[in-house]
Image (tube, helix red, strand yellow):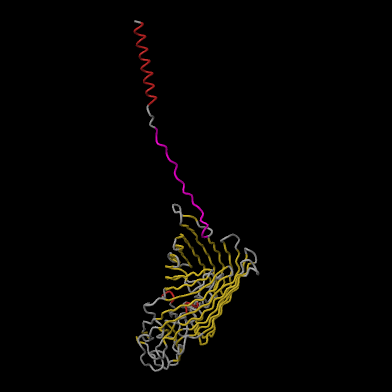
């Protein structure tokens, strides 16, 4: 019995040993190892300057994100109690610049949005710039190629020159090497139109309305240019040279002036077409299309011998029928007391377009006292002539207008001078103070309103001037 029990126990032990050995030989199923997540680090792109980085997931496109916040406090010498002497202004900007090197040249896409607020009035997001560059092609909204974007102007207020306006355009640039290039562009002419404007407090020929100095009645100017539809864009060209020494540019532009015709309402409510201001005879329903043009020369020079960062710049322009290229909008810039600026007027005797001629020059100099402190002086001069027979004394031929009424526009000279100082305690932060004086000297009489709503008498002046002061805090990043 003991023998049988021993054999059974031995057999069980052997089976257990064999089973254990077989179990040890079977493959073990383990959980698959979890791969570590790939980290796509942002890499610096030094090809295009500071601030660029490679877009994650892209091996060849570099991006720079930037922006600006600006706050201004502006004082403008008031003429009446209705004028805002003190104005506060704020602007925010955000922009993105993406660049890719290709076999055809640089592919660049740039977009800039801005929003401004002045007092109680605010504006929606504005596409300040948005363009594509591919090789020599530029398409979208960008600074006009008539302007010189390299000028280190430094001023905050208005000077009379083509101060880097943004317009919609298509352009092609030919690069010849050594900093020399030439560009031909078609630009949106509507953005360059300068026409009359309503000015109830204004004087003789202030655009869409003027005052009969005998009766004191305000009525529509029948000889205002009324722009029609655009059929030809502005054509702009330049040739420029740039280097470590500075830059030089010669620019030209052609601008279409297309009158759609006009009728006007007399003080008595009578609607009449344009008539000869002297004889009363009928004039054409609209003036023939004309073409204005402008030519400009600009440049700047670096002056490191005077101070690191010191520069001087100049921009001279002659325009005929293209006032925007000389830095003029519809208003001279003295509120509601001056005549408007127009590309052309309708001759009150012949019915033909008389183009506005403008000669102007602007310039400035900047000196760095220290790397953080800099001061600038600057100014501009302009001579504006509205053409032959645009200021005439009527002979009573216009219904409702007293005989002897002077209509049209008064030629004038304008001078602007100013200075500012900036402190930049840290990179990208600018704290500035500026003062500008502007004066327009009219060759004819200009009607100016004195007082506000309760005192609404008129007087005649031959010149108008005003001081302007500004404080600015600006951060670029």
Assign the magenta stretch its main secondary structure: loop
Residue 153 location, quadrant: bottom right
**Image quadrant in which the N terminus is located:** top left
Q: Nearer the viewer, residue 74 or 134?
A: 134
Residue 233 shows up from this direction? yes
Residue 102 location, quadrant: bottom left
Q: Is residue 20 above or below residue 156?
A: above
- The picture places residue 361, in percent across and down from the top left corner, at 55, 79
Magenta stretch: residue 38 in it? yes
Q: Nearer the viewer, residue 95 or 77?
A: 95
Q: Magenta residues? A: 30-48
Residue 98 shows up from this direction? no
Magenta stretch: residue 69 in it? no
Residue 256 location, quadrant: bottom left
- The picture places residue 87, in percent across and down from the top left corner, at 52, 69
- The picture places residue 195, in percent across and down from the top left corner, at 43, 79
* 155 displayed left or right of 346: right
- The picture places residue 95, in percent across and down from the top left corner, at 47, 61
Please give the count of numbered marks on the rendered protein.
Answer: 0
Q: Is residue 99 above or below residue 235?
A: above
Check the image and name the residue furthest to the top. Answer: 1
Q: Nearer the viewer, residue 33 or 128?
A: 33
* 150 displayed left or right of 199: right
Q: Nearer the viewer, residue 15 or 290?
A: 15
- Report the residue at 44% width, 73% height from top: 185
Q: Is residue 282 above or below residue 248?
A: below
């Amino acid at each position: 019995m003991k023998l049988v029990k021993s054999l059974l126990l031995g057999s069980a032990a052997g089976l257990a040993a064999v089973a254990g050995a077989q179990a040890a030989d079977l493959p073990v199923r383990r959980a698959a190892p979890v791969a570590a997540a790939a980290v796509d680090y942002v890499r610096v792109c030094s090809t295009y300057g500071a601030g660029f980085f490679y877009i994650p997931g892209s091996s060849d496109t570099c991006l720079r994100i930037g922006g600006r916040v600006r706050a201004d406090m502006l004082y403008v010498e008031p003429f009446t109690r209705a004028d805002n002497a003190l104005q506060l202004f704020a602007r925010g900007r955000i922009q993105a610049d993406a660049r890719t090197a290709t076999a055809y040249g640089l592919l660049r896409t740039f977009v800039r949005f801005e929003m401004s607020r002045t007092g109680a009035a605010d504006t929606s997001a504005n596409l300040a710039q948005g363009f594509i560059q591919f090789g020599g092609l530029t398409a979208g909204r960008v600074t006009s190629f008539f302007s010189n974007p390299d000028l280190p102007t430094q001023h905050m207020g208005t000077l009379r020159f083509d101060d880097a306006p943004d317009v919609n355009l298509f352009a092609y640039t030919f690069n010849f090497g050594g900093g020399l290039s030439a560009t031909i562009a078609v630009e949106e002419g509507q953005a360059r139109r300068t026409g009359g404007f309503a000015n109830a407090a204004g004087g003789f020929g202030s655009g869409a309305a003027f005052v009969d100095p005998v009766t004191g009645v305000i009525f529509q100017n029948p000889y205002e240019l009324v722009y029609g539809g655009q059929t030809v864009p502005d054509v702009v060209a330049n040739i420029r040279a740039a280097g470590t020494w500075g830059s030089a540019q010669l620019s030209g532009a052609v601008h279409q002036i297309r009158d759609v015709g006009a009728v006007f309402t007399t003080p008595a409510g009578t609607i009449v077409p344009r008539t000869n201001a002297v004889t009363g005879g009928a004039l054409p329903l609209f003036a023939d299309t004309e073409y204005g043009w402008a030519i400009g020369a600009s440049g700047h020079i670096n002056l490191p011998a005077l101070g690191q960062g010191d520069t001087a710049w100049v921009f001279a322009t002659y325009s005929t029928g293209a006032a925007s290229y000389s830095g003029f909008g519809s208003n001279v810039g003295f509120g509601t007391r001056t005549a408007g600026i127009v590309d052309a007027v309708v001759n009150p005797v012949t019915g033909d377009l008389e183009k506005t001629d403008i000669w102007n020059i602007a310039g400035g100099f900047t000196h760095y006292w220290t790397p953080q402190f800099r001061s600038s002086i600057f100014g501009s001069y302009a001579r504006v002539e509205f053409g032959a027979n645009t200021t005439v004394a009527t002979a009573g031929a216009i219904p409702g207008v007293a005989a002897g009424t002077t209509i049209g526009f008064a030629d004038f000279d304008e001078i602007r001078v100013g200075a500012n100082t900036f402190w930049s305690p840290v990179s990208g932060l600018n704290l500035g103070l500026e003062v500008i004086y502007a004066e327009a000297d009219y060759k004819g009489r200009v009607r100016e309103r004195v007082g506000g709503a309760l005192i609404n008498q008129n007087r005649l002046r031959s010149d108008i001037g005003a001081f302007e002061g500004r404080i600015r805090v600006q951060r670029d990043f």
